[in-house]
Image (cartoon, rainbow, N blue to C red):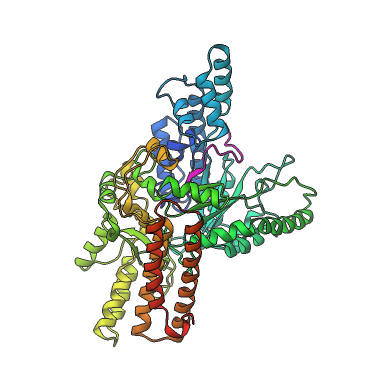
């Protein structure tokens, strides 16, 4: 049974988390109508998962070895087709189940958010005799799986493998991942994250499944994960000029998220969402006009227009009140809950040790680290097995990792072939260079710490799946949870988490958990504080201007939130305003005097 083109029974989706946490989440949630996202970074893990799941479910599995031509794309296609087959089988079982307590078809409808479909289910429960049987038959036909979407980090696009060999034309990581998805049977979306990749965008225009058929349907869809309106407009225009449709803009908080963090210059989620709401029609009209011109040139004539782009948001949500407020006030079509699902082992791959550490974690245990070899701040659980192993190697005077996969190789400072800055090969050479330099002891120590901070995340983020599936029981799991994880206090079932999101129950959260807007603002202030300390230690006019611009943006955001609280917020209004006042005072004190408002 093919995946639905654009049907969603739920307003919530589960975003991509690492390379292993959600790699098979669709097998846990799709049959209940919930969408989830598979990372396409690690085709080694993807192949290992395909072999493991095939054996578990009695499916034939011909191994795809490294030396096979176009192995990366072939592995991705084979794995996604396997997920499609298994989910289709699950949905058939759901449709055939009896309407009795605890059955999967009952779970399907009981987990739905308030909606016409849930109301129809309620009518069935109240009906008797032939009417009840007729409504049950209707409901069975309305059971549709959640979308099995995929994620491509556009910046991870190596042209050489980890041995330094040039990859063939269109064999780079991002392009081969796209080809693997496009050749699969899935009717779902590719989520593009981490910015623009013009080569990838151009390659996408070569696949007819991204263009509407005679009925205006898209077999494959594009979701752009963006941090602000400008990014949505710029990337949307580039795609529209190629005749490509963006089916969803997935707006993510720059800092209050999991994984890599992109803070910008003090851009806050509330004002960003307000701009999307204000400019939504302008965005749609602009992209529609550019698309029509491109489609005419491509010979598509008067192709039917697919549905308007959805707007969703993710990053830091923790309560049903926050979820409902964002959807209703900003006219959003849905929300993404990521880190919260790390507490749901029924859904994600997380080994018992990592889950126990996550449950015990407080705010100080979830840090915005320098561990990513990409050079982008990265949220990390300080007590994770990956971090413990990294520190142990440093203590044993053996810093760095083996680099078994090489997805992040890019540095050629010491070698002709690119190597990863988290690798033992790089860190040994770099530390020797620093030791031989004429730096002061303090400068030397800072640079050494910056070098050894890098971790092998492209391998260790697979640990959750590798350990729980028995693929690599000795793997050292890295946990890329967002700061919001510090406030969840215990593991939950899928049913409990969904009911929490829709306000039917309330899971225990830390009593001091701030509103998501306040938390994000406090994270920006923490970064501002660090930049102010840098400026004090090393006065710099460029940094001073940047600090002033960031501070002014944050103060403008504070003013927006004050007005929002007075007009709309009811719960925790006093605490919300008090938090704003305290943070505004600190921001004002951190902005360089010439940049402060007069």
Q: Is residue 131 above or below residue 337?
A: above
Tell me: residue 545, above or below residue 513.
below
* Residue 12 in magenta stretch: yes
Quarter location, residue 473 = top left
* Most foreground residue, 259 or 12: 12
Q: Is residue 180 visible?
A: no
Overall secondary structure of the magenta stretch? loop
Residue 420 in picture, x, y percent from top left: 39, 66
Magenta range: 1-15
Residue positioned 70% across, 45% down in the render: 212
Residue that appears at 46% across and 26% down = 106
Query: Residue 498 vs residue 171: left or right?
Result: left
282, above or below 592, in the image: above
Quarter occupied by residue 427: bottom left
Residue 443 relative to residue 417: left or right: left
Task: Decide whether residue 549 is among the magenta residues.
Answer: no
Q: Quadrant of the N terminus?
A: top right
Residue with the most extreme left position = 396
Q: Is residue 93 visible?
A: yes
* x and y, in percent, of residue 315 in the image: 45, 55
Residue 259: x percent and y percent?
Answer: 40, 58
- Count of numbered marks: 0
Nearer to the camera, 58 or 392: 392
| Side of 366 where 588 appears, left or right | right
In the image, what residue occupies the spot 59% across and 23% down? 138
């Amino acid at each position: 049974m093919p995946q639905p083109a654009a049907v969603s029974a739920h307003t919530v989706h589960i975003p991509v988390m690492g390379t292993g946490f959600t790699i098979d989440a669709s097998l846990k949630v799709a049959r209940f109508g919930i969408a989830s996202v598979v990372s396409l970074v690690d085709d080694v893990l993807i192949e290992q998962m395909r072999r493991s799941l095939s054996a578990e479910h009695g499916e034939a599995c011909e191994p795809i070895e490294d030396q096979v031509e176009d192995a990366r794309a072939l592995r991705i296609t084979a794995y996604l087709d396997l997920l499609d087959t298994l989910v289709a089988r699950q949905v058939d079982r759901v449709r055939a189940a009896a309407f009795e307590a605890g059955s999967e078809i009952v779970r399907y409808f009981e987990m739905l958010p308030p909606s016409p479909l849930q109301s129809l289910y309620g009518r069935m429960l109240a009906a008797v005799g032939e009417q009840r049987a007729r409504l049950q038959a209707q409901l069975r036909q309305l059971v549709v799986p959640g979308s099995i979407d995929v994620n491509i980090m556009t910046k991870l696009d190596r042209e050489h493998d980890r041995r330094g060999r040039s990859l063939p034309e269109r064999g780079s990581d991002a392009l081969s991942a796209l080809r693997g998805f496009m050749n699969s049977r899935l009717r779902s979306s590719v989520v593009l994250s981490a910015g623009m990749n013009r080569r990838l965008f151009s390659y996408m225009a070569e696949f007819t499944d991204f263009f509407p058929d005679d009925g205006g349907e898209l077999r494959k869809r594009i979701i752009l994960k963006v941090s602000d309106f400008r990014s949505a407009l710029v990337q949307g225009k580039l795609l529209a000029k190629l005749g490509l449709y963006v089916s969803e803009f997935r707006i993510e908080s720059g800092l209050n998220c999991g994984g890599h963090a992109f803070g910008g210059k003090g851009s806050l989620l509330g004002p960003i969402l307000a701009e999307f709401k204000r400019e939504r029609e302008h965005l749609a009209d602009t992209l529609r006009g550019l698309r029509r011109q491109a489609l005419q040139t491509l010979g598509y004539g008067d192709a039917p227009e697919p549905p308007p782009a959805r707007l969703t948001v993710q990053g830091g949500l923790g309560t049903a009140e926050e979820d409902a407020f964002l959807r209703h006030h900003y006219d959003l079509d849905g929300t993404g809950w990521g880190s919260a699902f790390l507490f749901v082992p029924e859904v994600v791959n997380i080994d018992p040790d990592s889950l126990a550490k996550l449950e015990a974690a407080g705010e100080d245990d979830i840090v915005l680290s320098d561990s990513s070899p990409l050079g982008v701040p990265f949220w990390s659980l300080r007590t994770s097995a990956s971090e413990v192993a990294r520190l142990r190697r440093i203590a044993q005077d053996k810093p760095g990792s083996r680099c078994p996969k090489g997805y992040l190789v890019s540095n050629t400072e010491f070698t002709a072939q690119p190597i990863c800055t988290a690798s033992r090969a790089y860190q040994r050479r770099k530390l020797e260079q620093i030791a031989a330099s004429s730096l002061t002891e303090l400068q030397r120590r800072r640079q050494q710490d910056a070098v050894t901070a890098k971790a092998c995340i492209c391998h260790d983020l697979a640990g959750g799946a590798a350990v729980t599936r028995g693929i690599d029981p000795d793997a050292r799991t890295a946990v890329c949870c967002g700061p919001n994880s510090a406030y969840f206090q215990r593991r939950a079932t899928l049913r409990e988490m969904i009911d929490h999101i829709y306000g039917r129950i309330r899971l225990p959260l830390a009593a001091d958990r701030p509103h998501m807007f306040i938390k994000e603002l406090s994270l920006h202030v923490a970064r501002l504080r660090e930049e102010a300390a840098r400026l004090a230690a090393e006065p710099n006019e460029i940094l001073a201007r940047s600090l002033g611009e960031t501070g002014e943006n944050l103060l403008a955001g504070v003013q927006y939130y004050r007005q929002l609280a007075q007009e709309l917020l009811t719960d925790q209004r006093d605490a919300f305003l008090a938090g704003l006042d305290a943070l505004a005072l600190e921001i004002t004190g951190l902005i360089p005097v010439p940049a402060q408002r007069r």
